[in-house]
Amino acid sequence: MVRSQSTSVRDRRQPGPSAYVNRIRMEYAAMHFGSSDTPVADIAADCGIENPSHFYKLFREHYGNTPRQYRVLHRVTPVQP
């Protein structure tokens, strides 16, 4: 298969649409891990990822920690009046 030069250059410079969607999903998940005790499986499903193994893999690639590690490190404590 022969590709045009512009296609091969574009492929190397920009992530594809799935990478963009996965980044948004991981940001959504991280926000919830830092502010709630919702189970990981529920947050993964809310992100549209039904396979927990795939979710863990994506999250670890994006943040360098498992969801549980991320939750411990980034826990937001509510302000007491």
Image (cartoon, rainbow, N blue to C red):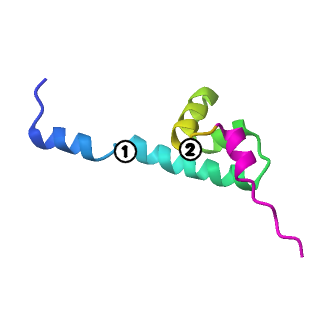
What kind of element bears circle 1?
Answer: helix
Where residue 52 appears, x then y in whole percent? 64, 30
Q: Residue furthest bottom?
A: 81
Left or right: residue 53 versus residue 75 is left
Q: CA distance from mark 2 to mark 1?
A: 19 Å
In the rendering, at what x and y percent does residue 30 appear?
Answer: 63, 50
Q: Mark 1 is on which residue type?
A: Pro
**Quadrant including the C terminus:** bottom right
Magenta span includes 69: yes
Labelled disc at residue 37: none
Q: Earlier in the sequence, mark 2 or mark 1?
A: 1
Task: Identify the residue at image location x=74%, y=56%.
Answer: 35
Tell me which residue sits at (34%, 43%) in the image.
16
Secondary structure, mark 2, is helix
In the displayed structure image, the side of residue 2 where residue 17 appears, left or right: right
The answer to whether residue 3 is left or right of residue 55 is left
Of circles 2 and 1, the one toward us is 2
Q: Indicate the amino acid at tag 2.
A: Tyr
The N terminus lies in which quarter of the figure?
top left
Q: Which residues are magenta?
A: 66-81
Name the residue that disc number 2 marks.
63
Farthest residue, direction top: 1
Residue appearing at x 70%, y 53% in the figure: 74
Which image quarter: residue 75? bottom right
Q: Position of residue 60 (x, y in %)?
A: 57, 37
Residue 58 is one of the magenta-drawn residues: no
Q: Residue furthest right?
A: 81
Residue where numbered disc 1 is placed = 17
